[in-house]
Amino acid sequence: MEVFDLALIWAFIIGFGIIMYVLMDGFDLGIGILFPFAPSEEDRDTMMNSVAPVWDGNETWLVLGGAGLLAAFPMVYSIILPAMYIGVFLMLAGLIFRGVAFEFRFKARSSRYLWNWSFAGGSTIATFAQGAVVGAYIQGFNTVDGVYVGGALDWLTPFTVLTGLGTLAGYALLGSTWLILKTEGRLQDWAYRITTPLLFTVLVVFGIISVWTPFVDNFVWERWFSNLGVIWILPAITLLCAFQIWRSVRNRFEGMPFVATMGLFITTYLGLIVSRWPYVVPPNYTLWDAASAPEAQLFLLLGLLFVIPIILVYTAWTYWVFRGKVRAGEGYH
């Protein structure tokens, strides 16, 4: 099998792993972002209990995507990590803080407020860092002969700050629609109330990013405006998903707001891929330039083909076992 074919397969697997992580870990990061604004401490218990059985399994997809990226496209690591050391460190630190808070908050008494802030702060920092990394990817990286030659803070620009804020709003929207699906009573009513303002915030921020993005790089401009009949289907589907969220909340549907929000994220993600394809280290290196040796790709791919079905099965089983509403006083812990 040629490296051309293997690179495409690996790009699909890694892309699938990343979108699975965004969808499945996005809502529990969103729960953390919303944590300080919950109506009561009892509601915070319910919010955390709604994601406690699944949050650590959701992060499996982050490990899968990261490990696959290192194995299949080592150039991505050699360029993007030096460019994004601070951003990646902030993301990992945030994930660590929120992970520790999951384990300690339910057992704490006088120090519970500290774990509340650890959970909320870790979720917020990790989410913002993820959004900033995406913004830096859209901007591209300053390289010479396959080596990053930019500064340590080149990733932090007004554009990446905006993408970070947009990701915060988007994950918060995922969190609120998850609460509509999984809770009831006062907490569910609160989730219904905040979902529409969060939706409009996401649309405004994503709209600004969409207008700004073509001006960041001429390649994106050409890709968008030379394929009007194809690429612009994605924004149309995004707006359709947004309308469905608004309509579902207005009619107090429980499952559809979450499903439509996932659809909104999928179309946005596909729009990002289409805008930059086939560059994995923009603006200079395609996925074939960055690919590892064909033998290494094939060897690791054979193992991954056994692992992915197992991950999908136990993930589906976990969500099935913990299906239904999470009520006050009940939970995984």
Image (cartoon, rainbow, N blue to C red):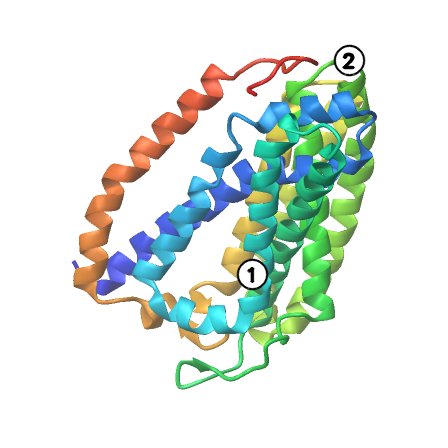
Classify mark 1: helix, strand or loop. Answer: helix
Residue in the foreground of this view, choosing between 70 and 215: 70
User: Which residue is label 1 attached to?
Assistant: 89
Query: Given contact means CB atoms under 8 Å apart, are the residues at marks 1 and 2 in contact?
Result: no
Quadrant of the frame with the N terminus: bottom left
Residue 155 vertical position relative to residue 264 in the rendered view, above or below: below
Place of residue 162 in the rendered image (x, y in percent of width and height, measured from the top left)? 73, 60
Residue 179 placement, left or right of 313:
right
Quadrant of the frame with the C terminus: top right
- Label 1: how many Cα within 10 Å (few below 14, some 14–19, many 20+): some
Please report the residue visible at 50 percent of the width from the left and 75 percent of the height from the top: 283
Residue 151 vertical position relative to residue 246 in the rendered view, above or below: below
* Residue 2, visible in the rendered structure: no
Place of residue 331 in the rendered image (x, y in percent of width and height, measured from the top left)? 60, 17
Classify mark 2: helix, strand or loop. Answer: helix
Residue in the foreground of this view, choosing between 108 and 49: 108
The type of residue carrying mark 1 is Phe
Q: In the picture, residue 304 is in which quadrant?
A: top left
Place of residue 64 in the rendered image (x, y in percent of width and height, measured from the top left)? 38, 47
Please report the residue visible at 48 percent of the width from the left and 68 percent of the height from the top: 81
Q: Nearer the viewer, mark 1 or mark 2?
A: 1
User: Which residue is label 2 attached to?
Assistant: 185
The type of residue carrying mark 2 is Gly
